[in-house]
Amino acid sequence: MASALHNLSSYDATTVPSAEDMSFGIVVADWNEHYTYAMAEAAIEALKANGASEENILVKHVPGSFELVYGAAWMMENEDVDAIIAIGCVIRGDTPHFDYICQGTTQGLAELNLHAEVPVIYGLLTCNTPEQAEERCGGRLGNKGTECAITAIKMVAYGDE
Ligand code: RBF
């Protein structure tokens, strides 16, 4: 499994452009907040570690992952940010709800990217168990928030080289 080999928090800093002049929006779903807040914190930390300033990082909350699509679209329309990171965590339950939320949110975020002026980074964890989420939110496999932050910086710089 690819994720078993890849730690989400490790990256080669020499390949990351400076985020000094970049601004970021982070949309965080409150559902499963134990995980999503840990991802958001890691994302903010990684943005700052690569030069972004606190005042250039805007954080807004939505109730659940499904609302990430609207939250990201709203941010794109109303805020002056260079990239948006959408952070959510869906954990499989007893009904097919999991599949609909994952499908709808993923499709929505992908569509936003097709029409977007700024990149929207996919920070949606889709887990079968809480243990899988734990492993990816600062556990054994690192933190997906860090990976999203580095991706956001690289995408803002995309085309500049
Ligand atoms: N939102 C999440 O971000 N992660 C979840 O695991 C999640 N599970 C849900 C399970 C059920 C049964 C319901 C009703 C909602 C769930 N949501 C979850 C919330 C969803 O993204 C959205 O906020 C609501 O469906 C809007 O009413």
Image: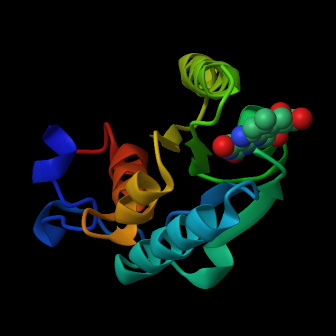
Relative horizontal placement of residue 27, taking residue 40 as reference (left or right): right
Q: Position of residue 138 (x, y in %)?
A: 38, 73
Q: Position of residue 77 (x, y in %)?
A: 81, 38
Relative horizontal placement of residue 132, taking residue 57 as reference (left or right): left
Q: Position of residue 118 (x, y in %)?
A: 57, 38
Q: Residue at x 78, y 61 (%)?
A: 60
Q: Residue at x 35, y 63 (%)?
A: 135
Does 138 appear above or below 132? below
Looking at the rendered image, the quarter that the N terminus falls into is top left
| Camera-nearest residue between 31 and 156 | 31
- Ligand 1 shown in quarter: top right
Looking at the rendered image, the quarter that the C terminus falls into is top left
| Camera-nearest residue between 71 and 119 | 71
Q: Residue at x 37, y 82 (%)?
A: 49
Relative horizontal placement of residue 99, taking residue 76 as reference (left or right): left
Does 56 appear above or below 72? below
| Camera-nearest residue between 85 and 63 | 63
Relative horizontal placement of residue 17, taking residue 56 as reference (left or right): left
* Colour setup of the view: rainbow
Q: Tell me, yes or no, if residue 51 can be seen here.
A: yes
Q: Position of residue 34 (x, y in %)?
A: 62, 69
Q: Tell me, yes or no, if residue 77 can be seen here.
A: no
